[in-house]
Amino acid sequence: MKVSALQKARYAYNPKLPAVLQQDIHTIAPAAGEPAEPAVDREALKALFPNTYGMPAISFVPGKSEEISRRRNVGVILSGGQAPGGHNVIAGLFDALKHANPESKLFGFKGGPSGILNNDAVEITETYLDPFRNTGGFDIIGSGRTKLESEDQFEVCAEVCRKRDITALVVIGGDDSNTNAAVLAEYFAANNSGISVIGAPKTIDGDLKNAAIEVSFGFDTATKTYAELIGNIARDANSAKKYWHFIKLMGRSASHIALECALQTRPNITLISEEVEENQTTLNEIVDYICSIIAERGNRGSNFGLVLVPEGLIEFIPEIKILISELNDLMAGHAEEFSQLEDFTAEAAWIGAHLTAESKSAFTTLPEAIQRQLLMDRDPHGNVQVSRIETEKLLIEMVDNRLKEWKADGRFSGSFSYQNHFFGYEGRCAFPSNFDADYCYSLGYNAYLLLGSGLTGYISSIANLAAPAGEWKAGGIPVTMMMNLEQRHGSKKPVIKKALVELDGEPFKALAANRETWAKDTCYTFPGAIQYYGPAEVCDQPTITLTLEQQNR
C-alpha cells in the first residue's frame, strides 16, 4: 500500500511514556488510595452499582504484581465519534499485553459496540497494527454508537467473551460510552462473569475530565487543527478586509473547544455557552452584543472580523434551552404519534398545541429552517442533534437584520458582509499531535495494567499532563466516581457528569481579561499547522487550557 511521506515518518515515532510505565512491566504494581465517590447522588448510585461503587483510586508504583503476566485474551471496542489518537490507545494496550505475556491475544470488535453483539472481531497482531500507529482515525476496527444498556445485550457480551476466552474488555469512548462500560462492569461483577471492563477517556469536546482525568484524548489535536484553520481565515480576513466570518466549532455540551481556539487565535468575538447560561443572556441580547462590536469596528473602518460560536450554544440560551427540553420530553413520550404526522406544517401545529405558552412563543419566533432542524430525528440518547442546527446562520440572519435597522437609525456607518463555516469533522481524524500520540499510548498501556491487576469498572488515568511525559502519573479511578443522575428519555439515568467551562477557571479568566481589546483591535495570532519535529516548545506543548489549569498546582 502506498503511503505519504508523513505516514511513513509517523510509523517510526516512539511515543513517550510516564517514568513508571517505562520500567519492566513485571515490576509495576497498583497502589490503592482513598475510596472515590461522586460529588452528588451518592446513595442512588451506590444502590445502582453495589459491586463497583466506592472503589479506591489507583496509582501505579514500582512493585511486583503476580497477575500481570498471566496469559489472557482481551477485547477492545472503539465507541462513539472519532478522536485523534485512538489507534495509539490500542497500540499501547497491545504492547503492554505482549510485554506481559507474548502468548496473550488482543481482539478488536468491529464497528463499535455492535461488533461484540454480533461476535464480529479481528485478532490484532503486530503486522495488523503497525500501519495504524501514530495515525488518526478509528479505521483500524471502526467505531459505532450502539448503546450497551440492556441485560439481554450484557448477556450476549458475556457469551461472546466466553466463546473467545476473553477475560477483559477495554472500551475507548466518551462519557456515554464509559457510562455504558460501567454498567456492563457492574453486570459482569454481579453475575460472577469473570470479565473485567476498563475505559479510556475519549472526546475532542474536552468535557470528559476531572481532577484525575485532566483532559480527554483528541482535544489537543482537534483544537490545534481548528486553530490552524481559524488562523488562516483570520489572515484572509485581515487581508481582504471585507468579511465577518462566523465559525461554528464542535462542542455540544461544553465550550472548551471554542475557548481553547480563542486563546490560540484571539478572534474578535467568542461566545461561551456556559457564560450565556450563567448570565441568562437571551438570543436578542447575544445579537445586540455581536452587533455592537461589528458597529464599533465598522464605524472605525474595520468591516471584517471573526466570531467563534460553540456548537451547543443554542441549548444554553435560556428560552431556547427550555424549548429544547420540552421538545425532547414531548418527542420521547409521544414518539409514535409524532412519527405519523404527514409534513412539517402538521408537526409544527402539533408541537404548538403541546408546548407551554413561553416555549411556543420562542419556537414561533425562530426562522422556519431552525424550527425544522429542532424537530429532526433525535440522537441515540433522545436529544436534539445540535450539530445539525445551523446556529451560525441563525446569528448571521438576525445580526444582518439588526444592523440594517441600526444603519437606518444612524447607529452604524460601516458595511456587513459575511461568510459562515463549521469546523467539526476536519479535526476528528487528524494525525495526532505528539501530545495526543504520547497520551493515548500511555492510556492504552496503563489500561492493560489496570485489567492485568484484576481491576474492573475503572477508567485509565494519566495525570500531571502539563509536565513533560516522563513526569506524568499513571493510575485509574472508578467510573462511578464521575457519575450523577440526569434526565434521559423522560427518566433519571446514571451518566458521567460532563465537565463544562468553569467561569472562575483560569482559561476563561484569560479570555475575559483580553476580549475587550481583541474585540476592538485586530490582534489575531496564527498558530500554523501542527508540528511533529523540532524543539519541544513547538512540538510537544499541551493546550493553553491545560497549561493554565495546572499553572498553580
Image (cartoon, rainbow, N blue to C red):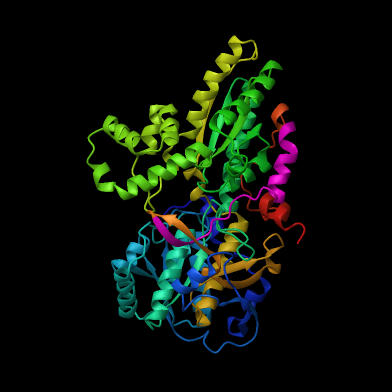
- Which is nearer the eye, 11 or 170? 170
Q: 230 left or right of 388?
A: right
Q: Residue furthest bottom?
A: 66
Q: Position of residue 401 (x, y in %)?
A: 52, 19
Q: Is residue 182 left or right of residue 472?
A: left
In this picture, which residue range is highlighted in magenta?
Answer: 491-517
Q: Nearer the viewer, residue 477 or 241?
A: 477
Residue 438 in view in this figure: yes
Does 105 sit above or below residue 116? below
Tell me: residue 474, above or below residue 65.
Answer: above
Residue 515 lies within the magenta run: yes
**Residue 461 found in image quarter:** bottom right
Total marks in image = 0
* 410 lies above or below 247: above
Question: In this orientation, which residue lies closer to the viewer: 358 or 4?
Answer: 358
Q: Is residue 353 above or below residue 185?
A: above
Q: Position of residue 169 (x, y in %)?
A: 43, 73
Q: Position of residue 102 (x, y in %)?
A: 47, 81
The image position of residue 294, as x and y in percent, is 64, 23
Quick one: 90 or 45, which is closer to the camera?
45
Q: Which image quarter: residue 466?
A: bottom right
Query: Can you see residue 174?
Result: no
